[in-house]
Amino acid sequence: MRYDLSAQFLRILPPDTNFGEAWESLCYDLLCAELKDTGLMRLSPPDLGIDILNRRLHQAYQCKSDERGAFGAISAASSIDSLTTAFKHRKRLGWKQYFFCTNSNYTGTALTKILKIVDSLGLDSSEVDFKGPKYWDDLCSRHFEQVSHRFDYRITITEKQVVESLKEAGYFERYLKEFEMKIRNARFSLVIKNNRTPLEIIIPFSEELTVENCLDAVKSILGISLDWTNFVDIGTSAGPSLSLTVNRIAQGFSQKIADLSLKPGDKLELWVKIIWRDETQKTGMDEQTAYHKQNLTLYCHTILAGRKEMNRVSLTLEERRKITIERADEILQNMIWSGIKRLAV
């Protein structure tokens, strides 16, 4: 997921008063941008089981959310209540398709319960559909300018977290004490963005430390692993290569931050390049293991369950490259979001 749709980053803007309403507002804005349809209507309570109605296309949308975003799960109970209520008013409201709009996926058990109700109401499977986090992530990618005001992707990192990140990166205690003193005395901070997500982190740092020191800290803060992942079904693998860039130009590891001549407001960018190989690696891990290391086992099952079977021999070299990079990008994006959420615990 390029965009984290959780309560940590989605802002609650008036007149919304809670996260559920903020999620509904985001869905409405994204649908307006995607459908280029001003005929979309938001229904006020009692909403009759429908939050957004498109009378021209005869489509009804019900918004359900989990504050944890894609790392959470939507329960069946409230969704079933909404669908049952909407069905009672179907003729009056004139909908032919009903969509559940969610920022996280349903568990298999929840989905089974909903589909059972769909069947008992005599609805065809084509009349009820699920627009999950991947759908809204794609819409954010296409229309982020229209909804950027609804998000705050800036995270402030503490001095303690920076020092802990360097410790995790393997620095010896004697260096950690020296770095901690330099950071504390510097009263200086860096804004660092990355090319895989809209996240920006603000970290206290010292201009006397090097680009490599900064890269190690950021890599650890974001939870990025340099391990390679094997995609066994298509016989390929991929891994990340990291650099810190200014205006897309990679900076030398031995340079001091002071040598970069950053002006107020300038940002460093963590540039994550995906390297791929048309073969698996002996030291690489499979996808399930990669997601499990990020505590994203449920999210991984959802991704793999919805994936079409692939066969290496049926794909061209270019197709294998494209699929490999897309999968590795998905892992990296979720690695970053998972890393940031770990800091909030």
Image: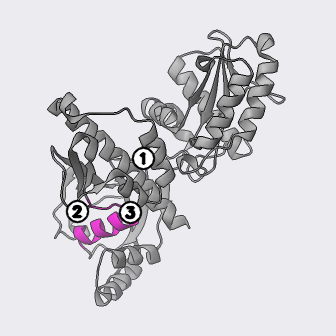
Picture coordinates of residue 330 (x, y %)?
37, 45
Q: Which mark is residue 198?
A: 1
Residue that carries the numbered disc 2 in the rendered image: 260
Residue drawn 21% across and 35% down?
312
Question: Eyeballing the image, is 210 above or below 266?
Answer: below
Q: From what the image shows, is residue 22 above or below residue 101?
A: below
Task: Identify the magenta region.
Answer: 210-227
| Element marked by disc 2 | helix
Label number found at residue 113: none
* Disc on the earlier residue, 3 or 1: 1
Task: Report, in whole angstroms, how far the alpha carbon at label 3 lies from the one at label 1.
Answer: 16 Å
Residue with the mark numbered 3: 223
Secondary element under disc 3, as helix, strand or loop, is: loop
Task: Give the quadrant of the N terminus.
Answer: top left
Residue 189 visible, this orientation: yes
The answer to whether 11 appears left or right of 172 in the picture is right
* 200 and 93: which is toward the camera: 93
Prevailing secondary structure class for the magenta stretch in the rendered image:
helix
- The answer to whether residue 265 of the structure is visible from this angle is no
